[in-house]
Amino acid sequence: MDDVGRTSNLQEHMRDYLRTRGALLLVIGYVALAVGAGAWALTRHDAPAPYSMSGDTRPRLPDGTIASGTSMSVAEAIARRPAHAVAVHGYLMAAADDWPYLCTRLNDFTDCRGAPRLAIGLKNARWLFFGPTRVQGLETGCCAIGSWSPHPVVLRGRVRGRSLLLVSPSAKR
């Protein structure tokens, strides 16, 4: 084999090697970028910690004022199952990819894991998040984290099983 044939053969092997190596480096680069972006999103210091509770546990009305009337806890509402509409206090959690809940307490999970909770009926819950009567003081995280209340919120509704069917804020009490 002459020098031209060896050079051509060597160039083909180098080209194949570099194609494979280039593709591998490209994949590694994408993985590193994804890991870096994920680490950045999870460690942003200017964003509230997902599902964090305030040290002030006084229940608030949806407009943000401290509630002065009586209300029952989520656990008490589940146990009593009153036949009429009642005021229930708990932490509002609304993950972007799940039902909104009223929880006894918050933790690092979107389902109030280990704590009593009431699923909020969606039929009449739009006012919680939109319009002039929306719940004030909600914290919001990125992506599927959604929104939550760092303070207990008092919501009025009928308890059916483990659901809370809200009474419209414009309805007479």
Image: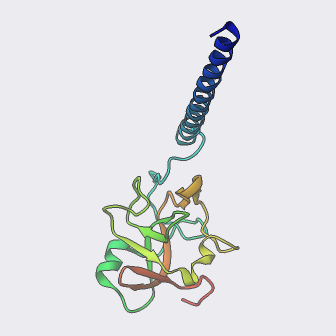
Q: In which image quadrant can residue 159 be found?
A: bottom left
Answer yes or no: is residue 156 visible.
Answer: yes
Q: Is residue 122 left or right of residue 58?
A: right
| Whether residue 140 is situated above or below residue 83 in the rendered picture | above
Q: Residue at x 60, y 21 (%)?
A: 13
Instruction: Point out the image quarter for the C terminus.
Output: bottom right
Please identify the quarter of the rendering in which residue 6 is found: top right
Report x, y in % for residue 93. 49, 64
Q: Position of residue 103 (x, y in %)?
A: 41, 67
Residue at x 55%, y 41% (from the top left corner)? 38
> Which residue lies most toward the front here?
1
Front residue of 157 and 71: 157
Residue at 42% across / 76% down in the picture?
Answer: 71
Kindly tell me whether residue 140 is visible in this rendering.
no
The quarter of the displayed image where residue 114 is located: bottom left
Q: Residue 88: give x, y in percent of width and height.
A: 43, 76
21 or 8: nearer the viewer:
8
Question: In the rendering, at what x and y percent does residue 133 appear?
Answer: 65, 74
Which residue: 62% across, 24% down? 18
